[in-house]
Structure formats: structure tokens, C-alpha cells
Image (cartoon, rainbow, N blue to C red):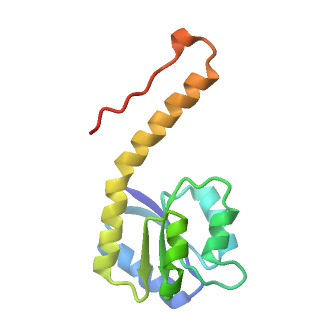
Amino acid sequence: MIKALLIDDDDHSRDYLKALIGNHIPESTSLHIAGDALLGKELAEKHQPQLIFLDVEMPKYSGFDFLNMMEEKNFDVIFTTAFQKYAIRALRFSELDYLVKPIDSDDLRSAIDRYLQKKPEQRQRNQLYGNLLDSLRNPDLKESKLAITTAQ
């Protein structure tokens, strides 16, 4: 199940994407909505979404500004924008996908499928990282854990 946040300054775009998610993404268990980056930051910190649908061009603070504001980035991002010119910059943020408005339901479904495929890999990486931190914090070598990846 997916906890999501939608950040977009345009009412029509928000309503359209909200309807697409409601009609085509049954895995979405909750969807919070923000009309600007500052409210988006507040909602992200409060609700801890797993996935954020993020517009790029917004008044005052852009989607990139939003990402830079976040101290902890424990979510994936699907950029949703009317401008193709930001695709390269979005890739530099290592984001999951980049959907150009008007968003097609098949493209949205493909992006969600990629997210769902990525989730188990991310969980495994988080477990390995947790083991590493535990081992580094524990001065007793007898209690240390060695994580070995067995997937090929």
C-alpha cells in the first residue's frame, strides 16, 4: 500500500491527478495534497509519505527547492510537470519518474509499477544499512553482524 503526497500549485492539475490516482492506482491508501512547496514540506514531515507527486514550476519555491528543503528524504518522487526542459535536472535528483502534463493514465500506472518493483530493493538496502550502523555503534565485536547480499 502506498502513502502519497501530491504537491502542485495548479487546482486543475491537482484535481486531475487526484482523480487519476483514485481511479487507476488501487495501491494508494492515502493521498495528502498541497498547493505549494512549504505546505508540502509540512505535510511530508507530518504524514511521512512513501511517494511524492511533485510539480516543478510553482510560485515562490519550485519542486527542486522543496527537495532541497527536506532534511530527510525517505520518499520517492515522481515529477509531474508541463515542462520537458527539467527532465535532466530531475534525473540529477535520482527521482523515480518524470511525467509530462497532461498525464496519461498508462504512464502513471507504469511509474507506479516501477515504484512497486523498486520497493523491495530499497527495503533490503535499508536493512543492510541498519545492520552496518548497528555494527559501527557496537564496540563489542562478538555482537557485530556481517551483512552479505545473497541476491545475484
Residue 147 in view: yes
Pick out the residue farthest to the right: 60
Task: Indicate the quadrant where residue 45 lies.
Answer: bottom right
Q: Residue at x 45, y 36 (%)?
A: 127
Tell me: 42 left or right of 84. Answer: right
Image point (55%, 74%), residue name: 89
Residue 10 to residue 62: above or below = below
| Residue 9 x/y as whole percent | 60, 84
| Farthest residue, direction top | 142
- Residue that appears at 46% across and 34% down: 128
* Quarter the N terminus occupies: bottom left
Q: Quadrant of residue 69?
A: bottom right
Report the label total.
Answer: 0
Residue at point 61% right, 79% down?
35
Q: Position of residue 152 (x, y in %)?
A: 26, 39
In this rendered view, identify the residue nearer to me: 46 or 148: 148
Residue 44, above or below 64: above
